[in-house]
Image (cartoon, coloured by chain):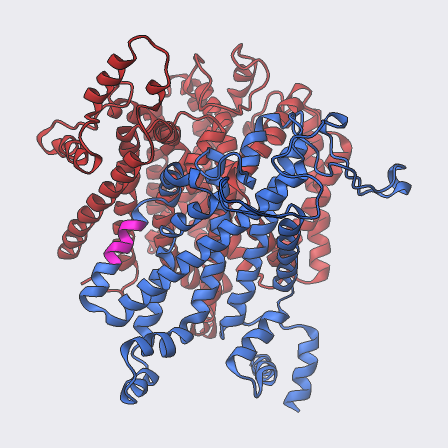
Chain colours: A blue, B red
Amino acid sequence: MIEEKSENAIQQKEVEGLSQGRIVLKRFLNHKAAIASMLILLAIILFAFTSVGIDIGSDSAKIKIPGWWKYDYAQINDVENKGNPTMDLLPSFIDGTGMAIGNHPFGQDEVGHDGFARVMRGAQQSIMVMFVIGLVATAIGVFIGAVAGFYRKWIDSILMRFTDLIITIPVVIVGAVIGRAVGNLGAFLLAVFLGFFSWTGLARLVRGEFLSLREREFVDAARMAGASNLRIIFRHILPNAIGVVIVNTTLLMSAAILLETGLSFIGFGVRLPDVSLGYLINENQTAFSTRPWLFWYPGLFIVSIALCVNFIGDGLRDAFDPKQRRAITSKDKRVAKVVSK
Amino acid sequence: MLKFITRRLLVSVVVLFAATYLMYVLTAYSGDPLEDLRTSTARNKEQLIQRRIDLLNLNVPPYLRFFIWLGGVLGVFVGKFDLGKNISGQLVSNELGSAMVTTMQLVLVATVAAILLGVIVGISTALRQYSAFDYSITFTSFLFFSLPVFWVAVLLKQYMAIGFNDFLEDPQIPIVLIFVFAAISAVVWPGIIGGRMKIKVRIGAIAFSITAGLLFILNLTGWFEKPGIGPVSGLLMGVAIAFAVTALSTGLANKKARNASLVVVAIGMLAWLPFNLFSLYVSPLIFFILAVATVIVGYLVGNLMGGQDKAPVARTAAITALLMGGVIALDRFMQAWKPYFESSYISGRPFATVGDQTPNLQGSFWVLGVDKFTHLLLPTLALLLIGFAGYTRYSRASLLEIMNQDYIRTARAKGLPDRTVVMRHAFRNTMIPLTTLVAFDFAGVIGGAVITERVFSWSGMGSLFIEGLRRVDVNTVMGFFLITGTVALLFNLLADIVYSLLDPRIRVN
């Protein structure tokens, strides 16, 4: 009992005199894994986009911003050293060769494509697809969930049956069909279309939040003050449901990157001449015994991106959840003693 | 209740209808079904194209062609079920039938294993919240969650299957590895069991010596060449099972339950030899009957020995009987290992990386069972890792929430032992939200198995779907979707019904 009291005291002390936003930010900054993941993810994004530059548009109207890496992802080079990676991270006192980056740090495939450039381009595409799916799905999910939860009655029934309809189709299946149909239009459009089918979980959660929030006093107060329905939905209720939305958007994004790579792997996602991480793995899976590096690097990038996004989501969940209590450390106990005196 | 089910069923049918329409049109517009013929150099090209157009009614636009297809499907009510023909003119229902069995095996085994493992690990991490064990499992499950299934699958093929096959050529574990394994178990077990430092050190030492000793014995006796359990270790395992089940189910203080479980184990030991003599005649059906009979015997024994409080004793004895039967069956499967391993179709490399069975392999139920196992192992592991992560996170969060409820405090306050509080008051309530998750998940896993099947070249529904989609073979894709869609809707309905049955606070009407 005493322990519980002091735990409460710790938490009260921590958040004394802070606004809700500040509390959330403070809690998030305290989540070490989430902060580390955020930094790693930012580093990966910067690295991927600056190294091989940015390509926008189709072949006819191409905007190309060059990057600092000397090779392009579609360029075919002479095969050096049987395509082995030239990167050597072990310093000379361990293996006697010294650290080096070399011409092709991630190796080359049998034609001579530079592995590093291809992995970077693939990471770009996968990250872009992840964010676009996240944005599109969040926008649709929030809108449908909010309208269904706020207006209830027949609007709710229709929208929720519509949600059921989309849920019935497993997302890999619809993704494959969509990918087959629009995959040749480029990764961006593919992502937009995938977003059209990924919003269902979020819509259900937002609807649940709205159903309970719309009965609260502050909604009545806003209505008394003459606020319109739209104003109540977007200015009064939605900010209160923002925690659920943000947390689930991150989870959705980590699922999105796995979806895109999976689709590209079975051949219905991003297509040649463009590459994505899933495509690279598919292309090289049979060459595992001869050129394992072509297989390892794209996979490691997928795992690191998805893992970082998942940890950020976990940190956000902890930060937004007022009931969440983290482990009480010995330092906290010392603070608690001081506070309870 | 009946009213609720009827209403939901009607709505489901409408939803399924709309979803199939959407799928049909999307698939039909996703590409050109005549593409392979248009680019062909056959002399009778025009004729072939015309034949395919007639076969699949391609001159009817997709949004109307759907109704021709629907008419065939609705024929099920008049006994003339027709899913149409695929692009090469074969009946879709024929190829779908065998593919469905293959996929269901994979999905069922993977889902059941993921639930069992995930719930056990999730519960134990929740009970050791914020321990090193908890943190490492949390990290691991995040990692599994972020793994693309196709990447894991290729790694599993390369390292598990090929590595293990290499090991089986000369099955001796190197001494260094034995110590590594023992050291790992010396770290893991104290983490799971928990307690003070002194106890942890003691458990660690015991775990180290048991693991090292066991592996040494397995090495010395050549166990990996000719695996088996044998009566002595079988008896030890049986007694351990009896005590463990009793401890979890009723608590060891219940002497009747403990004795009934031990009697069941004794019956199992007596039945072992006759079973082995008879075992060559076992077919899948007989195997199933035997399993049911085992549970019934256990239940009866528990009922006879239960005295005044029959139900929990009978339950304990029945679970023990099933597990003891499992030990006996496992031993028999292991005996089939050597003939399987030496069979000419296997040629000493049992763990398969492709396919769902060894072609042309003949043998008893047991040999075929081992074959199934070696083929199922890798794809199941790939699916399992990902499902496991979700179930672990979910059951952990769910149990933690419940452990903070007032009724748990009440149960503790009235002096109930820890086991009763956790198993009876908390665990059962944790299972309620989990049932809905399982129902949702199952449909999702069938979809997810598409990728896994492809990596392992299983000829299941996933490969049908991918091939069908690649050739814009609408009828095949729709056959696949009809099944996954129906399963998804049925399981959703089932989840709602089960939920309302388990949780009296929820009223369906």
Q: Nearer the viewer, residue B249 or B186?
A: B186
Could you tell me if residue B260 is visible in this image? yes
Left or right of A303 in this view: A243? left
Asked which quadrant contains residue A46, the reply is bottom right
- For the C terminus of chain A, the image quarter is bottom right
Name the residue: 50% across, 24% down.
B354
Horizontal and vertical percent for residue B116?
Answer: 46, 46
Number of numbered tags placed on the structure image: 0
- Front-most of residues B474 and B242: B474
For the point 16% across and 28% down, the residue is B81
Residue B505 in view here: no
Q: Which residues are magenta?
A: A160-166
Percent position (x, y) of residue B355? 46, 23
Residue B169 sits above or below residue A47 on the image: above
Image coords of residue A142 (percent x, y)? 37, 64
Residue B424 occupies quadrant: bottom left
The answer to whether residue A164 is magenta is yes
Please tell me in which quadrant of the rendered image residue A101 appears.
top right
Q: Nearer the viewer, residue B434 or B291?
A: B434
Q: Quadrant of the N terminus of chain A?
A: bottom right
Q: Is residue A112 left or right of residue B109?
A: right
Residue A324, how many percent across, how many down?
52, 71
